[in-house]
Image: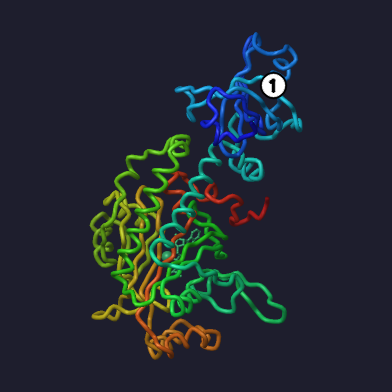
Amino acid sequence: MKTTISEVGKYVEQIITMGVWLANKRSSGKIAFLQLRDGTGFIQGVVVKAEVEEKIFQQAKDLTQETSLYVTGVVREDERAPSGYELSVQSIEIIHEAKDYPITPKEHGTEFLMDHRHLWLRSKRQHAIMQIRNEIIRSTYEFFNENGFIKVDPPILTGSSAEGTTNLFHTKYFDEDAYLSQSGQLYMEAAAMAFNKVFSFGPTFRAEKSKTRRHLIEFWMIEPEMAFMDHEESLVLQESYVSYVVQAVLSNCKLELKALDRDISKLEKIKAPFPRISYDDAIEFLKEREYDIKWGEDFGAPHETAIAEHYDMPVFIVNYPKDIKAFYMKPHPTRDDVVLCADLIAPEGYGEIIGGSQRIDDEKLLKDRYEEHNLSEDAYQWYMDLRKYGSVPHSGFGLGLERTVAWLSGTEHVRETIPFPRLLNRLYP
Ligand code: 4AD
Ligand code: MG
């Protein structure tokens, strides 16, 4: 029976064949332990000299790292194995012999690993992180589909900016100027007026010169947008979405969380509702703790971490000053210096994972904002139309996938949370 490592549980005490790579091996004169992987998982193959032909034992002992092979053997249940199974190897058929695989089981520096990212992805740790990434994506689609959202795909090549003009990726669109999308939001607002509740999932680009453990040049965002929903209702949706994803990862990525040594007790208590603190109170909180910050300034990573540590839960910071936020955010009903927005800060120092707001739905107010933000109204004519023809209160948010993967997998740096990271000074591989 030809199968995969993920399916071996169905074939206990039966003979199976699998296509695999040799991840690592250990051997003595009498027995060889082969660490095998096939992309669906990892399993140990045991070759006992006394039980197989001499030629097969020798072949197993000589296998080099990352050689591809078909292995045939009997599946055994084994409590000590992380996956619960082991393979008693009967025969081996080499497909392709790998020579001098550069990533050996010894420690390598980060730059070396990043240069070999195309191979590094095969490691157990990277495998676990990518499985968690996939589970977040899978449960995101499930959550929004179950809650009456439809997926809409905004364009990547755009003629206008959504999140300020400082980090735009410029390109030519034949004779016109164009930019890679920083956010699909403006298009999602149009989609919400057509389909009510929508979400997108796609790559976004920011030419950020910052070299931090939270910033990528190309990252993936999940952007829901909801017609007839105010900011308060949006916060409730956000906390229920994030809780759902955390629970899905806990239920469906047990092996991966274990492989990464993730302290899951920290994730198990993540349940809606999440605490909220106003921007005003957050500034006071920081000042009391001797941070050098004034009202009107944006938070840096140390500020966010201090706030997050205090709550030990994801925390919403609500109602930021209008001057440090995007042009489209709706002003607070009783204060004109702050807007109806929130950032969701992940616990354990992983930083802001969601930025969201209620959007301006008044035509005149939006016009004023273009002027204040030095944006050319021409590029936003279509966006203005949404305020001309049946404008309604609406809200939305964007969740950064890589920061969420970093948080749930307990990965220090976002460069390990996307298959091929685009970083400052890194476009290879
Ligand atoms: O807070 P941001 O800039 O919000 C927006 O783009 C809104 N238009 C979203 C919306 O309302 N539809 O970005 C949203 C999230 C951040 O909270 C963060 O998690 C992530 O995107 N993010 C980044 N992740 C990795 N690298 C970067 N350079 C990021 N910039 C933002
Ligand atoms: Mg933000």
List x then y, in percent, for residue 254: 43, 38
* The image quarter in which residue 368 lies: bottom left
Residue shown at 73% from the left, 15% from the top: 58
List x then y, in percent, for residue 257: 44, 39
Q: Quadrant of the N terminus?
A: top right
> As displayed, is residue 84 above or below residue 232?
above
List x then y, in percent, for residue 317: 31, 63
Q: In the image shown, does 12 or 270 lie closer to the viewer?
A: 12
> As displayed, is residue 385 above or below residue 106?
below
* The image quarter in which residue 272 lies: bottom left
List x then y, in percent, for residue 24: 62, 27
> As displayed, is residue 114 above or below residue 30?
below
* Left or right, 207 with reference to 410: right
Q: Amino acid at mark 1?
A: Ser
**Residue on which disc 1 sits:** 91
> As displayed, is residue 272 above or below residue 100?
below
